[in-house]
Amino acid sequence: MSEPWLYPTVLLCIYGFFSSHRPLEPFLTPFLMGPDKNLTETEVVNEIYPLWTYSYLVLLFPVFLATDYLRYKPVLILQAASFIVTYAMLMKAQGVRAMQLLEFFFGLATATEVAYYSYIYSVVEPSHYQRVTGFCRSITLLGSAIGSLMGQILVSVAHVPLFYLSVITLVSSCIAFVAPWFLPMPGKSLFFHEREHSSQDEAVLEPMNRGQLIEKPEDPESKMQLSADERTTLRDNTSSSRLLEVLKMLWADFLQCYSSSTLLAWSVWWALSTCGYFQVINYAQALWEKILPSNDFEIYNGYVETISTLLGAFAAFVVSFVKVSWAVWGELALCVFSLVIAVCVCLMDTIRNIWVCYTAYIIFRATYMLLITIATYQIAANLSMKRYALVFGVNTFIALVLQTLLTVIVVDSVGLGLDIFLQFLIYASYFAAVAVIFFIAGLYKLFKRRRSGGQNELPTTESVPEA
């Protein structure tokens, strides 16, 4: 092909589409609690689902390092294999223990997602980062939306049993498994296999689930770079000491990154809200099943997931055209939108009507995707790709630690093992507390700015000291 970036991009898009094309996903809880698996609500919610949170937390940091050391491609293959194992077990395995093991493999697949979004930065030129990232992000959202829509149509129109949705999901995972084998092996990575490429610094990548890329013209003077001494150290060290040097470098970068008050504020919101977001989407189907049992009524989970995914992607796209001084109004905006999220979760819990629940869930997901996009831009605007990967990893890790604590206390049978309605009441209160935190932070910033008499205008982003 004439364009060297096109070949790996096409393969990544094929992989991203089929790995995210999961028609069964909107119906996972009804499938587990239905005649195929015959599990109880307590077993699914309090004993099986928490294993995903625990495995994701335990695997995140070692997978982050292994992904960089192995240069992405082997970890992509591992992720594809994990999806196959997950959905093969979902078809054949029975019992709580088997489903818990399944959740471990799904946690592994989730933790290795970093390889998918990091690979492109090692095989394409920086001038193509934005385009390739947009393609990969869009195709995964499209795969997810089409999968949810297909699942709903098969269930509602063709009356296909949920078991066959698991077969289609497994077939999609098998197709996805083929693509990574043909990807070129990168010659460099962010930390362990660095080449001299500082003159072409990386662009910004938005991570999860679920957002949209926003790019700002790079400011080489404000971007944090590794010092020449650090780069030389990494190149010259032997393999046995390289890991230690990478860890030291990561720690030094961590201290410098979070010395920025702006970055710290958005990172705090990222970690707190992502924790609550994971909890809500993980257990939303259990709430819907409680309100409207799938054995007795027709459910529309697939349509809801499709609409919420597309609306969230649209909201993330629209925010790139909004001109707001986030350094001034950021905390208050986070307060208002966190309050909206809290109200949505509260409505899902208290108004026991499935249509209200569906609508609130759609608004909830769209609002989160909009905010996480803004947070991504604010955090990444003055960071090199290296440090953005670090901050993203740290924020996600903190979110998972908080989520694990919440899961152990509220959800897991070894803790309180609360009813699903009480769980969602706690999640609504959690987001309300987040809103209060940023309301106080926003008032403090405005009060501090008024006391200064507006003489020192706040910048749109706060630069972090250079290494």
Image: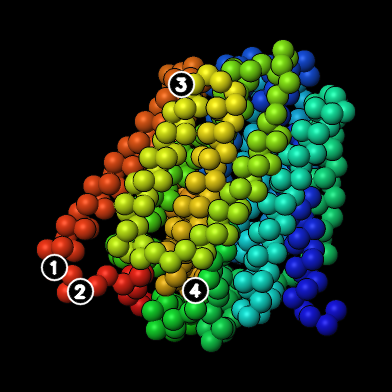
Please name whichever residue, 465 or 342, is drawn nearer the observer in this view of the structure: 342
Picture layout, residue 439 above or below residue 406: below
What is the C-alpha distance between the residues marked 3 and 4?
Answer: 42 Å
> Image point 40% across, 27% down: which residue?
426
Picture layout, residue 391 above or below residue 467: above
Q: Tag 3: Cα neighbours inside 10 Å, few (<14), some, or many (≥20)?
A: some
Q: Where residue 316 is drawn, which disc sits there?
A: none
2 and 1 marks in contact (CB < 8 Å): yes
Query: Residue 322 appears at what percent x and percent y?
Result: 47, 63
Picture layout, residue 214 above or below residue 107: below
Q: Disc 2 marks which residue?
A: 456
> Image point 56% across, 20% down: which residue?
353
Q: Secondary structure at mark 4?
A: loop
Q: Disc 3 marks which residue?
A: 350
Q: Disc 1 marks which residue?
A: 452
Is residue 417 in view?
Answer: no
Query: Residue 162 appears at what percent x and percent y?
Result: 80, 26
Q: Tag 4: Cα neighbours inside 10 Å, few (<14), some, or many (≥20)?
A: few
Picture layout, residue 200 above or below residue 346: below
What is the C-alpha distance between the residues marked 1 and 4?
Answer: 29 Å
Q: Disc 4 marks which residue?
A: 216
What is the C-alpha distance between the residues marked 1 and 3?
Answer: 45 Å
Screen quadrant of the N terminus: bottom right
Disc 3 marks a residue whose amino acid type is: Thr
Query: Residue 206 appears at what percent x and percent y?
Result: 55, 60
> Image point 50% across, 27% down: which residue?
348
Disc 4 marks a residue whose amino acid type is: Lys
Screen quadrant of the C terminus: bottom left
